[in-house]
Image (tube, rainbow, N blue to C red):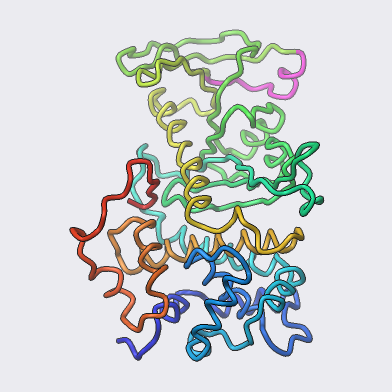
Amino acid sequence: MNNGKTVFSQLSEFLPLHEFRKSVHRYRGDFKVLSFSCLDQFLCMAFAQLTFREGLRDIETCLRTVRPKLYHRGIRGGISRNTLAHANENRDWRIYADFAQVLIRIARNLYANDPFAVELEQTVYALDSTTIDLCLSLFPWARFRKRKAAVKLHTLLDLRGNIPSFIKITEGIRHDVHILDELLPEPGSYYVMDRGYLDFERLHAFSLRLAFFVTRAKKNLRYRRVDSKPVDKTTGVRSDQTIALTGVNTVEHYPDKLRRIRFFDVENKKNLVFLTNDFSLPPESIALLYKQRWQVELFFRWIKQHLRIKASFGTSENAVKTQVWIAISVYVLVAIVKKRLHLGQSLYTILQILSITVFEKEPLFQMLTSYEHSNLQPEPDNQLNLFT
């Protein structure tokens, strides 16, 4: 029953605030803070993500317009551009990173039984990174190129539900393959990645931890064939081989056997060669697994289009990481709301509705389900939809 709460207040009820307070206490976020707490900061930044605000002055103007409603929305401190900027610069970004991980665990449990393109009981992850360009004069700490700054968002995406399970924000100059050192592979899980992560010493660690990987082979790969299996070429599979590496360094770094699958992509007229340490799945399933890696690319494009991470609300490393982690929290929060309310709309549609109804006093479920589909303009063909 709605007791006159705004949509934003109802949305905030899906947040496990006891876990948020634990994160604040862990990093002493509210130490000597008289007003504008970490929760105030989080809610203001979440409001900016939901309503597509472009800067701190934009946030200040919008929230001051509805000042009488702020207390009931959970924002108890005074709103000013300088106060918010100071909080973004000085409040430890790990507060919001830890809280985002709490939301991620909740969302992953909700989407754990969602159907997947390949019939597997195990978890399947896609690993990739995206670059967020920055101005070198304003962000000198974010080294990338001689005249350019950037940060990289390294993401391990759980393909059941497209929920990020691991995120690491680094300087743009950081090479993707080094992120493998920070992952703790789960036994039995599948990790799908492109050729940028092809490092046999690091991949051998996956095998030692009983995890599976699927990646692309490079053209200069040196190997010898140990065995070949018959294949059905009508499926696109051209060969299914067991190989041993013969390179000077690779044979030492990966002494075990590998599976090499050559596949012809009819749609794009391309020959693809996959490497994996899984010898049980049919070869066409391995190819289909790799095809699902595209979901992480869609995830990156989606958050860049619909969340505010390309225009920064601060110039320090702490401010940038705070903004990105709160954006991820909003993404996961909306995914949680979609699942718990059993909504059939896409994440894009839900976000668009929330963006113009945050001050409305109507039950959240009714707000998200009462609109007429026939009155909506069709989404453009290039619009990305997750959770369709």
Q: Where 175 falls versus 93 (above or below)?
A: above
Q: Where 363 falls versus 204 (above or below)?
A: below
Report the residue that reaches farthest toward the left: 374
Would residue 181 be found to the left or right of residue 121 on screen? right
Instruction: Name the quadrant containing residue 196.
Output: top right
Q: Where 22 falls versus 199 (above or below)?
A: below
Q: Residue at x 76, y 60 (%)?
A: 316
Would residue 283 be found to the left or right of residue 260 on screen? left
Question: Is residue 250 found inside the magenta-colored segment of the image?
Answer: yes
Give the quarter of the figure containing the N terminus: bottom left
Instruction: Name the quadrant containing residue 265.
Output: top left
Pick the residue in front: 212 or 35: 35
Residue 77: x, y in percent?
63, 87
Q: Residue at x 69, y 35 (%)?
A: 177
Residue numbers of the magenta segment: 248-259
Question: Is residue 225 found inside the magenta-colored segment of the image?
Answer: no
Q: Residue at x 43, y 12 (%)?
A: 229
